Amino acid sequence: MYLQSYRALRELLNTGASKIEYENLDVYKRDFVSDAHQILPGEEKYYCREHDKSFKTSNMFFNDLGAINSHIHIRDVEIHENQNFSYWVFMPKGMKQADVAIFLFHGFNEKYWDKYLPWAHFLAEQNQCAVILFPIAFHMNRTLSIWSDKRKMFALSKKRNEMFPNVVNSSLTNVAISLRLHTRPQRFIWSGLQTYFDVIQFVEQCKKGENGLISAHTNFHFVSYSIGCLLAEILKLTNYNQYFDNSKLCLLCGGAVFNRLSPVSKYILDSEANIALYSYMVEHFEKHLENDSHLNHYINGPHRVGQVFYSMLDYKGKREYREGLFSRVKQDVFAIALKRDTIIPAYEVINTLQGALRDIDIPVDVDDFPFSYNHVTPFPYTEKNKDLIDEHFKGIFGKFSEFIKG
């Protein structure tokens, strides 16, 4: 089932059709326009409408370390692909409108939905609900096509290795995002905030009856992977307008706070970008906030999402606040970590979700598979061991489906 579903759905979705049919599924492609892109870096003046407050920022946008390619260091606020993009909705065949939906959030530095297609298929079928593949800002189809150009990215990676001879795991796959985050680490926060506001915008459109596939009374759940778990946690813990009171939060290979991740990988980030991110968001974050009134307003000010986001950056910082939030939603959270995952280790997921004193009763299963896997590819798409892979894939997502059903 897993391998067959992966191959067939990948081929069908790559046709670009706005609706496809596969077995017992109808799959729809829908367009979305982000209202939140105006908070992104690149402007000199900003305005928070909610709090009637204006901000000025530095206009030295391009005078940064590593700015070696104009297609990488384009002003974030001007990237059209990140403002206007599409998402996918998987639904049981014949369902006109869903009243239960699952957001399926992906991992870091991913550009294609292929891996998640059998996941969405299984969840939609098992739960008889809609599954929404909603992309994180500057990932998937929200990026410039040049960032996936192998020849040009290989040349950039070669140049980056020359500039930083001690860099580890610089590759054509991660060079675009590594350059962007090395140069301006705050992009991680702004893209996270934009995505958060995009999801809220999507939910509110549904509640107003503006989405033909999702009803106004839909209850939303989350099945998230890797860095997508951080997004889902922030949505659940912030619980804007009580939209997610009854939402279940299922976490796969994720859930740990930011500074307990090990993302240096040729598929994710190189070492120089990781050092810059850690320095900015953990070691010197308060100082950076003092010098950036716009970011400080969202993180240290009246925006609850920023307060929750801040609590998920550093394990020691704001620990009691974070653990208090998790304690209040513990009945709605379930995580599965993998024993051989070195990017987001199982024990760090446990440390975050169950708390320093292990007094938060959030179940964290630590699983292992009798085949070769890693964080990036938990379920390989190979003929070898395909029956075993199918069995364990169904086991993992079967647990999530049962948890969502309650």
Image: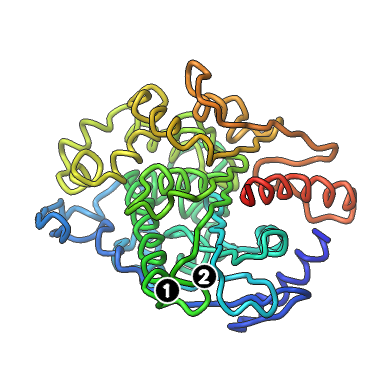
Q: Position of residue 107 (x, y in %)?
A: 55, 50
Amino acid type, mark 2: Tyr
Give the answer, above or below, for where 41 lies relative to 4. Answer: above
Q: Nearer the viewer, residue 397 or 375?
A: 397
Residue tagged 2? 87
Residue at 19% across, 61% down? 43
User: Regarding mark 2 in the picture, which secondary structure is present there?
Assistant: strand
Q: Badge 1, how many Cα within 10 Å: few under 14, some, many 20+? A: some
Q: Position of residue 229 (x, y in %)?
A: 52, 45
Asked if labels 1 and 2 touch by Cβ distance under 8 angstroms, the answer is yes
Residue at 71% across, 45% down? 399
Q: Position of residue 120 (x, y in %)?
A: 66, 61
Q: Nearer the viewer, residue 239 or 153?
A: 239
Q: Residue furthest top?
A: 357
Q: Nearer the viewer, residue 83 or 400?
A: 400
Distance of mark 2 from mark 1, alpha carbons? 7 Å
Amino acid type, mark 1: Phe
Tell me which numbered mark, 2 or 1, is placed earlier along the sequence. 1
Answer with left or right where residue 273 lies relative to residue 381. Answer: left
Q: Can residue 244 be seen at all in this image of the molecule?
A: yes
Quarter the N terminus occupies = bottom right
Residue tagged 1? 32
In which quadrant of the rendered view does residue 318 lie?
A: top left
In which quadrant of the rendered view does residue 300 lie?
A: top left
User: Regarding mark 1 in the picture, which secondary structure is present there?
Assistant: strand
Give the answer, above or below, for where 315 lies relative to 173. Answer: above
Give the answer, above or below, for where 217 lies relative to 281. Answer: below
The colouring scheme, among rainbow, by chain, secondary structure or one colour, is: rainbow
Answer with left or right where residue 131 lies relative to residue 203. Answer: right
Residue at 57% across, 53% down? 173
